[in-house]
């Protein structure tokens, strides 16, 4: 698993809006909040995504980009983003390779962890928030902007 202070693994994933998002494109330009979630349209993951949606403008004011990653496909992400008015990219990690690189997989290689990485402009992981309920999880991320 990636640890705080380490360089975040690079990746290239398709977003629900058709763009290809590459982690290295943000080096020196933006901080990144990268959250891994289990599945579109589940209670906790919907609450978490909507929470990030609601703090999106505040994150942008602090030079952050935000990306949600799950193993769901692009079509599922498109419906989920539209239904909940998600303003940031949802990325499809169908093979779970990015989740594996970040240590976001749970037991038996299942995507069953709630984990968020706050990555600085230098590409280093500044903060990892793991294992909290969606509401408390969002509160911890909000503290990084205080």
Image: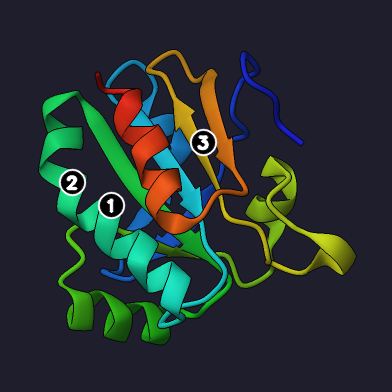
Q: Secondary structure at mark 1?
A: helix
Percent position (x, y) of residue 141?
37, 35
Measuring 38% from the left and 56% from the top, which residue is drawn there? Answer: 20
Residue 81, visible in the rendered structure: yes
Q: Quadrant of the N terminus?
A: top right
Q: Do tag 3 and tag 2 residues touch (Cβ < 8 Å)?
A: no
User: Toward the viewer: 100 or 142?
Assistant: 142
Q: Secondary structure at mark 2?
A: helix
Percent position (x, y) of residue 53?
21, 56
**Residue on which the image places disc 3:** 117
**Residue on which the image places disc 1:** 52
Alpha carbon of mark 2 to alpha carbon of mark 1: how far?
6 Å
Q: Is residue 136 left or right of residue 71?
A: left
Picture quarter containing residue 62?
Answer: top left
Percent position (x, y) of residue 29?
27, 21
**Residue on which the image places disc 2:** 56
Q: Is residue 64 left or right of residue 44?
A: left
Q: Quadrant of the C terminus?
A: top left
Q: Is residue 132 left or right of residue 29?
A: right
Measuring 18% from the left and 46% from the top, which residue is drawn there? Answer: 56
With respect to residue 33, does 132 lie above or below? below
| Number of numbered markers | 3
- Badge 2, how many Cα within 10 Å: few under 14, some, many 20+? some
Which badge, 1 or 3, is on the more N-terminal residue? 1
Which badge, 3 or 2, is on the more N-terminal residue? 2
Alpha carbon of mark 1 to alpha carbon of mark 3: how far?
13 Å
Q: Do tag 2 and tag 1 residues touch (Cβ < 8 Å)?
A: yes
């Amino acid at each position: 698993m990636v640890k705080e202070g380490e360089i975040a693994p690079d990746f290239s994933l398709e977003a629900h809006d058709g763009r290809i998002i590459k982690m290295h494109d943000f080096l020196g330009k933006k901080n990144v909040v990268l959250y891994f979630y289990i599945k579109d349209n589940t209670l906790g993951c919907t609450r978490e995504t909507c929470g990030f949606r609601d703090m999106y403008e505040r994150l942008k004011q602090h030079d952050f980009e935000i990306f949600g990653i799950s193993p769901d496909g692009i079509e599922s992400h498109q419906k989920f983003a539209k239904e909940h008015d998600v303003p940031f990219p949802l990325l499809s990690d169908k093979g779970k390779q990015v989740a594996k690189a970040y240590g976001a997989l749970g037991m038996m290689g299942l995507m069953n962890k709630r984990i968020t990485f706050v990555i600085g402009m230098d590409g280093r992981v500044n903060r990892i928030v793991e294992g909290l309920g969606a509401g408390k999880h969002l509160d911890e991320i909000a503290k990084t902007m205080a």
